[in-house]
Amino acid sequence: MTESRVDPALLAGNRKRLAGYQAQHFVWQVESGVATLTLNRPERKNPLTFDSYAELRDLFHQLKWAEDVHAVVLVGAGGNFCSGGDVHEIIGPLIQLKAPELLMFTRMTGELVKAMRACPQPIVAAVDGVCAGAGAIMAMASDLRLGTARSKTAFLFNRVGLAGCDMGACAMLPRIVGQGRASDLLYTGRSLGGEEGERWGWFNRLCEPAALLAEAQALAKQIADGPTFANGITKTMLHQEWAMTIEQAIEAEAQAQALCMLTEDFGRAYRAFVAKQKPTFEGN
């Protein structure tokens, strides 16, 4: 559906541009449909704070309506991905809170994962160095993960006296690496090295540290240049079908694919094939 055929009032409430978003607690840049979100506290290995958690949650939620962002790269500055929740700005204050406020916090962190899974843009995590605690969860919540041989991923929760069931880890991690391997990581809190992570399927591939961001952005650009409406449907179905039977999944995919066949991109692909050309997708 082209913009000229859509009621402006509908567009106003359901489409927005995020290329110019001014981030307060990280770096946000958009180029050619690819957003690069950089966690930018390198002196502390990019830990999260209450404020950055909330801003990340809200931004990923807004991506549902973004018409100028088609894929996201998530990366950390300074050779590390993310060391988790800041010990002094999050962990220390949590010790002083009562149950209602603690539940407020854990629900907020969970909402970040929900927003990452619900946004239609595929997310590519570029993981180098330390990737621990909430950082490991954000990598887990991404759609694709590129790593380096020197990366160290650790779900540290039990090492600080907490359960491994944090922010969806017990549901999502076994689906990525398998039940036994997830149990290993969640019960021990040990670090998963880059090469082992690639063997386990945690990483889609390993890159040289100096090339990691460029390769992640190239992968995101490849995705962004594809049929972005259909890519959003793929992400939705990959997520929703976890809770479906095979029969339900097949029917849901039949409906989803029929919807994609109504898009202009489907027609563009056919016409390009007939003309022996590469299709140029426009996401509609």
Image (cartoon, rainbow, N blue to C red):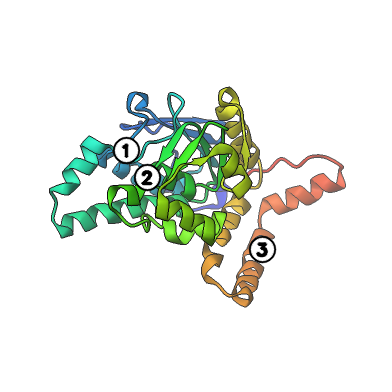
Residue 248: image quadrant is bottom right
Q: Is residue 232 above or below residue 87?
A: below
Give the residue at x 23% y 58%: 103
Q: Nearer the viewer, residue 174 or 61?
A: 174
Mark closer to the chain start, 1 or 3: 1
Q: Position of residue 36 (x, y in %)?
A: 49, 32
Q: Between label 2 and label 3, give the one nearer the viewer.
A: 2
- The amino acid on which the numbered mark 1 sits, given as a three-letter code, is Leu
Mark closer to the chain start, 2 or 3: 2
In the displayed structure, does residue 158 sit left or right of residue 68?
A: left
Q: Nearer the viewer, residue 40 or 148?
A: 148
Tell me if label 1 and label 3 are in contact, CB under 8 Å.
no
| Residue 29's disc number | none
- The amino acid on which the numbered mark 3 sits, given as a three-letter code, is Gln
Residue under label 1:
48
In this orientation, does residue 68 appear? no
Callout 1 environment at 10 Å: few (<14), some (14 to 19), or many (20+)? many
Q: Position of residue 39 (x, y in %)?
A: 39, 32
| Residue 134's disc number | 2
- The amino acid on which the numbered mark 2 sits, given as a three-letter code, is Ala
Q: Position of residue 148 (x, y in %)?
A: 56, 32
Q: Nearer the viewer, residue 131 or 122?
A: 131
Element marked by disc 3: helix
Q: Between label 1 and label 3, give the one nearer the viewer.
A: 1
Element marked by disc 2: helix
Residue under label 3:
257
Q: Nearer the viewer, residue 278 or 212?
A: 212
In this orientation, does residue 153 appear? yes
Cα distance between the residues tagged 1 and 3: 39 Å
